[in-house]
Structures are given as C-alpha cells and as structure tokens.
Image (spheres, helix red, strand yellow):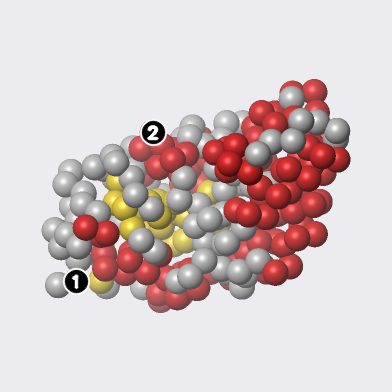
Amino acid sequence: MNYRSTDNNDDTLLTDVKGIRAVIFDLDGTLVDTIPLHVLSWIETCKHLGLSIPTMDHVNTLIGLRALDIARKLCGDENAEKALQIKNEIYLSLLGGAKAINGAPELLKMLKEKGFTIGIVTSSSRRVAIKALEVTGLYNYIDGIVAGDDVNKGKPDPEPLMKILHSLGLKVSEVAVVGDSKYDAEMALNAGVRVIFFLGSHEDPRVISIGNLLDITRYLDLGQFLIRH
C-alpha cells in the first residue's frame, strides 16, 4: 500500500480502494468539537469525588479511550462506575453549546448523496454520543452507532469497529475509518482496515494524514476514493 499525506500536497492516487461503500467515524474531536467539554467534565468529576485533580494535558492523553476505562485511570476501579455517571451528567449540562467540527455537515451530506453508509464508533457512552449528534445536527446522517458502553473492550481494540461492521452488514474491506486520536488509528489497523484518515499528522505510512475533514473530498469521486487532479 502506498498511502500519502494530503498535507504534503501529494497527488498520488490512493490505492486499495475498490469496493469501499461505508465510512466509519470517530465522534469527539472528529465530527463534534467536544474534547474540551470532556476534559473539563473529567476534572470536575475528580473534584466532586475529592480525588487528586489531573492536569488538562493528562486528561487529553486519555481522550479516545472508552469512557469507563478513563474513569478507572482517573478515579480508580472502585470509583469508576460512579465517576462515569457523574461525568456524564456534568458533560450533558455543558453540551448545549457544542458545535460540529468544520466541514462535518458538508462531508456527511456528500457521503449520503453518494450512497455511502455512515457509522460512528465512539468511546463515549451511547447516551451522551446521541445527544452530541442531536445538538450538532448530525444525527440524521448516521446509519449506526457503537458506543463505549456497547462493548467489553474499547479502542484501540478492534472490537468496537468489528461490532459496527457486523451490525451494518459490512466487511473490513468495504470501509474507510476517520479519526483524530492514536486510538482510532490503532483500532482500525488492528482490524485490518486499508483506508484510514487521520485528522492531524500520523507517522504510519498506512494512515492518510488530513488537515480537515473536507480534505477527504479530494479522495471522493462518484463513490470512489480518488485524487482530483
């Protein structure tokens, strides 16, 4: 496979793309601008429980893991379930002003018009994921969701991705994955996905680095992932 980064202005044709008919997205930081809200919610949860207060930088390194796994890391196994409940309530109270990531509505609309199936694999709990999609106006574009509380193992384990593929009747060879954290890329690679878009810079040559979501349109043409010259 010969994947190149769009941020290097490389117009090499993307390979291994025949038969792709679905795009599976991460949610937070990829489609919705909610990472700061998650970070703040975890910090406030630790304060509420009288625990050591983590730094924003530390919490940021955990975003992308399953929510319950973050709770265990920040609050301990004994507090994890309660911490997650508190965190979700705090997060939901902050969510009203959340916005879609630039380009997300336009990209999802384009994908639907071209007949692609659109799925979400998120480490957030299902309840808060659906609320984020509703608040940002993206919910009606989505064909299926697998959330952190739907699986036994979260990202970077391939279980969440394999579960949504099963629910949507898709094969690994038929999907592209889009994410913004190392856990998204690792999950996709662990599942054997061939086309992975990463918002930011990724060193793995199997992963396509993009500057923003609409960069993906450079690979889209009548249902095929191609570079437009």
171 with respect to 194 (left or right): right
Q: Quadrant of residue 190?
A: top left
Which residue is at 52% across, 37% downward? Answer: 155
Question: In the rendered image, which residue does mark 1 sit on?
Answer: 228
Q: Nearer the viewer, residue 160 or 39?
A: 39
Image coordinates for residue 76, horizontal then vertical, percent: 74, 25
Image coordinates for residue 97, horizontal then vertical, percent: 70, 69
Which residue is at 53% across, 55% downward? Answer: 29
Q: Quadrant of the C terminus?
A: bottom left
**215 in relation to 181, above or below:** below
Q: Secondary structure at mark 1?
A: loop
**Neighbour tally class for label 1: few under 14, some 14-19, many 20 plus, Cα within 10 Å:** few
Residue 12 tag number: none
Which residue is at 66% across, 28% downward? Answer: 73
Residue 190 tag number: 2
20 with respect to 142 (left or right): left
**18 in relation to 205, above or below:** below
Q: Quadrant of the N terminus?
A: top left
Q: Secondary structure at mark 2?
A: helix
**Neighbour tally class for label 2: few under 14, some 14-19, many 20 plus, Cα within 10 Å:** some
Q: Say what amino acid the circle numbered 2 marks.
A: Asn
Confirm whether residue 2 shows in the render: yes
Q: Nearer the viewer, residue 126 or 168?
A: 126
Which residue is at 85% across, 35% downward? Answer: 49
CA gap between label 1 and label 2 equals: 29 Å
Q: Say what amino acid the circle numbered 1 marks.
A: Arg
Image coordinates for residue 27, horizontal then vertical, percent: 55, 55
Labels 1 and 2: the sequence-earlier one = 2
Confirm whether residue 174 shows in the render: no
The reply to whether the C-beta atoms of the residues labelled 1 and 2 are less than 8 Å apart is: no
178 with respect to 127 (left or right): left
